[in-house]
Image (cartoon, helix red, strand yellow):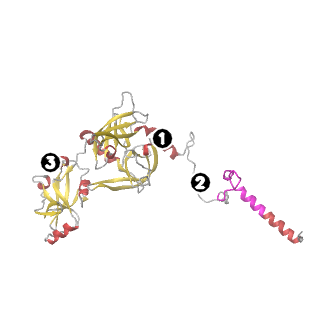
Amino acid sequence: MRLYSRKQLIVSIVAAASIAALTVVGIGLVPTSSRGATGEVDTVAALPKAPLAMNTGVEPLPVLSDVSGGFSVDERENIDVYERLNAGVVNITTEVVAINWFLEPVPKEGGSGSGSIIDSRGYVLTNNHVVENAFKVFVNLADGSRYEGKVMGTDSENDLAVVRFEPPKGLSLTVIPYGNSSNLKVGQKVLAIGNPFGLERTLTRGIVSGLGRPVQQDAKTIIRDMIQTDASINPGNSGGPLLNSRGEIIGVNTMIYSPSGGSVGVGFAVPVNTAKRIVPDLIKYGMVKRGWIEAEYVQLFPALVDYMREKGSPLPVEKGLLVSSAHKAGNADRAGMRGGTTPVRYYQSVFNVGGDIIVAVDGMETSSLADLYSALEDNKPGEKVVVDYYRGSKKLSASVVLSDRAEYLGTR
């Protein structure tokens, strides 16, 4: 048995008392909820906290809540938008025509997407790619009812379409109101309602991540001024509304950037002001009436630029649209623009060089055919646009009265 001196005993007792005091203080700061079933203490939660009486000079934030439900103001806003408007979002399914082994046309299930009821008569705004090539279109409402719809009009250049179904008498439809996409701000809260992966009327939220994004769909189509958002958008959300905090449509959810095929927080929506501009044409004509400059064009490319310079053409630019030919008595010809005169074969194509080179239309830089389509996307037949072009090394401008694009291209 080991014997301790009086001095050693006093030191041991003091040390033990100090450890006990520290242990009691530490346990006293741990909230009850941080203990597990075994009574073990969560080490992160057990860290000492700042004294409550410490004055930081900053007033604590108030807890904003709805007394009736205990929800924060932000949560109440989200709930209100969903409860008021989710019935105005429809699920759209399609049937397409396929060819079987006997080369017979047979119906086949197509794709699906979302849409917004924009009129109490049964008009639905959605994406063009949702109803593209559809033989039949079905509109599924929130109450489970299903109606066959009719595609009233489509616009591939903005990936928008209008579908109409006939609601039965006495059925009151929830209409989602238009908002305004011209005054959006990056950081503004947005909500998306749609049918991702067939899960009907799902609400997601996020912010406006960017504005004015140009997104190229194909070789001749760029959708400009798209809204970028981090609100979760997945397959099946296409055509659904992007809403502001008041529940107004500010965009039509259209596409996502995703290496994996799922949402990674980079989604794009067509601005609602674009939809407001073209929907009347879609309903009235089944298409959008757009203006056109009556000429044939060739986009400049390095080999063509080198060839023209070798032939002595004073080419001051390397990007633009070469006017291969200007339609005789057409609006470009009447405005004084000239087409090429020297035919050139390039692979499978034959075109004329020596004509004017367009570099801007209606104030928009024009270096490709997609740029030309975009520059004239919001111009109607009969309107005037200013065309900037080079003739040799001299830069000129012409005011062109636009013709109807569909009529001109349909006669070629």
Q: Distance between the residues labelled 3 and 2?
A: 71 Å
Return the x and y of residue 63 as percentages of the image width and height: 57, 48
Q: Going from the N terminus, do you reach mark 3 or mark 2 first?
A: 2
Horizontal arrangement in the rendering, residue 156 relative to residue 341 (left or right): right
User: Please, what is the three-letter code of the amino acid marked with disc 2?
Assistant: Pro
* For residue 20, above or below residue 77: below
Q: Name the residue under label 2.
A: 60
**Residue at point 72%, 56% (across, down):** 28
Quarter location, residue 197: top left
- Residue mark closest to the camera, 2 vs 1: 1
For numbered disc 3, what is the local secondary structure? Answer: loop
Query: Is residue 136 something one can see in this rendering?
Result: yes
- Judge the density around disc 3: few (<14), some (14-19), many (≥20) Cα neighbours within 10 Å: few
- Residue mark closest to the camera, 3 vs 1: 3
Q: Name the residue under label 1.
A: 80
Q: Residue 412 carries which label?
A: none
Query: Is residue 316 something one can see in this rendering?
Result: no
Q: Going from the N terminus, do you reach mark 3 or mark 1 first?
A: 1
Question: What are the residue bounds of the magenta stretch?
Answer: 19-44
